[in-house]
């Protein structure tokens, strides 16, 4: 386990700083067994980004946890995380609340989350008590510093509405889906020049309610962006995402969401579901 960064005195004084120092919750063994270096899933079983509405169908896909490089060179990640005791309200609250302060992002996954910021305009939206909870993250951009498996990166995560993601809104309802955490991502190595190329990716956490709580059906497409509600492959011709990238991201996803499911019910109760 990597050494934790030292918190500032102000951060240490926060009531939720205790979660930063807590031993991380262990991930699902079966998930990690499916994510092994050099052992990608069969790319033919991957969900094409053009077919995201297949997530609205009941049941599960052939592969719910795995990684690979697609025929067109894009990277692909799928992870299924069951979260017993977690509610949809907690999830929506978390993705608004944690954007307001570095410590909140750090305690989610202390080994790989280092900082977060949003614009002052977006901060006002998050703190607007009259704004619907999903609009406190959808339509907002988080600038995070994290290590998702390939070293520390600057990542801009621009969250999308379900409609902008391209979902069929006449089908986007319970019990097929409860909420959506989806975004365009642009990343570069920490410290890279401002003019350095940024790596595009699309993130989709499709959340359904299950008898014990909720489940995250996570999907990532490395090399893509959603533009005008449609996916676009932005890799230069002949370029392929190295297999280590989706492998590292899949492992990171398993670890960070295993920890979140352990701490979220407690934090939500302590903060009384308030965003401030």
Image (spheres, helix red, strand yellow):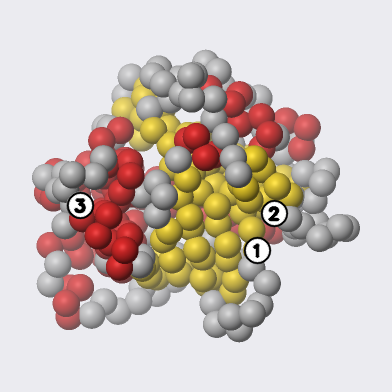
Q: Is residue 71 above or below residue 179?
A: below
Q: If the image is split into quadrants, where does the C terminus sit?
A: bottom left
Seen in the picture, residue 78 relative to 256 is either above or below; the reply is above
Which residue does the image show at 30% across and 33% down from the upper left? 88
Report crowding for label 2: few under 14, some 14 to 19, many 20 or more residues within 10 A (C-alpha). many
Name the mark on residue 31.
none
Where is 155 relative to 221, above or below? below
Q: Give the vertical position of 237 relative to 95 (above or below).
A: below
Secondary structure of the residue carrying tag 2 is loop
In the picture of the structure, the residue carrying the numbered disc 1 is: 199
Q: Residue at x 58, y 66 (%)?
A: 187
The tag earlier along the polypeptide, 3 or 1, is 3
Please rate how many residues cluster around mark 1, counting C-alpha atoms within 10 Å: few if below 14, some from 14 to 19, many from 20: some
Disc 3 secondary structure class: loop
Tell me, for residue 223, which label it has, or none.
2
Q: Is label 1 in a helix, a strand or a loop?
A: strand
Residue 128: mark in rendering: 3
Asked if the residue under mark 2 is in contact with the one under mark 1, i.e. CB atoms within 8 Å, the reply is: yes
Camera sees residue 54: yes
Q: In which quadrant is the N terminus drawn? A: bottom left
Q: Quadrant of residue 64?
A: top right
Q: Is residue 149 visible?
A: no
Which comes before the other along the chain, label 1 or label 2? 1
Spatial separation of the CA atoms under disc 1 and disc 2: 7 Å
Measure how far apart labels 3 and 2 are at the Cα level.
Answer: 34 Å
Q: Return the x and y of residue 214 as percentages of the image width and height.
A: 36, 30
Q: Report x, y in % for residue 179.
A: 39, 33
């Amino acid at each position: 386990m990597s050494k934790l960064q030292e918190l500032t005195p102000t951060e240490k004084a926060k009531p939720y700083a205790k979660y930063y120092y807590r031993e991380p919750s262990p991930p699902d063994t079966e998930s990690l067994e499916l994510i092994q270096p050099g052992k990608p899933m069969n790319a033919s079983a991957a969900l094409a980004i053009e077919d995201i509405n297949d997530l609205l169908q009941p049941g599960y896909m052939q592969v719910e946890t795995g990684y690979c490089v697609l025929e067109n060179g894009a990277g692909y990640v799928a992870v299924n995380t069951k979260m017993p005791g977690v509610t949809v309200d907690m999830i929506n609250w978390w993705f608004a609340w944690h954007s307001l302060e570095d410590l909140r992002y750090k305690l989610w996954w202390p080994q790989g989350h280092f900082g977060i910021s949003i614009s002052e305009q977006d901060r006002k939206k998050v703190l607007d008590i009259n704004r619907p909870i999903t609009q406190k993250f959808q339509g907002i951009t988080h600038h995070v510093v994290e290590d998702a498996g390939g070293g520390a990166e600057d990542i801009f995560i621009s969250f999308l509405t379900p409609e902008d993601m391209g979902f069929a809104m006449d089908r986007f309802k319970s019990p097929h889906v409860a909420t959506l955490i989806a975004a365009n991502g642009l990343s570069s190595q920490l410290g890279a020049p401002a003019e350095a190329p940024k790596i595009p990716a699309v993130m989709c956490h499709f959340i359904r309610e299950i008898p014990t709580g909720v489940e995250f059906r996570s999907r990532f497409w490395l090399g893509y962006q959603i533009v005008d509600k449609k996916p676009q492959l932005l890799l230069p011709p002949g370029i392929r995402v190295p297999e280590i990238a989706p492998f590292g991201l899949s492992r990171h996803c398993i670890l960070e969401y295993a920890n979140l499911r352990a701490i979220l019910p407690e934090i939500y109760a302590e903060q009384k579901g308030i965003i401030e």
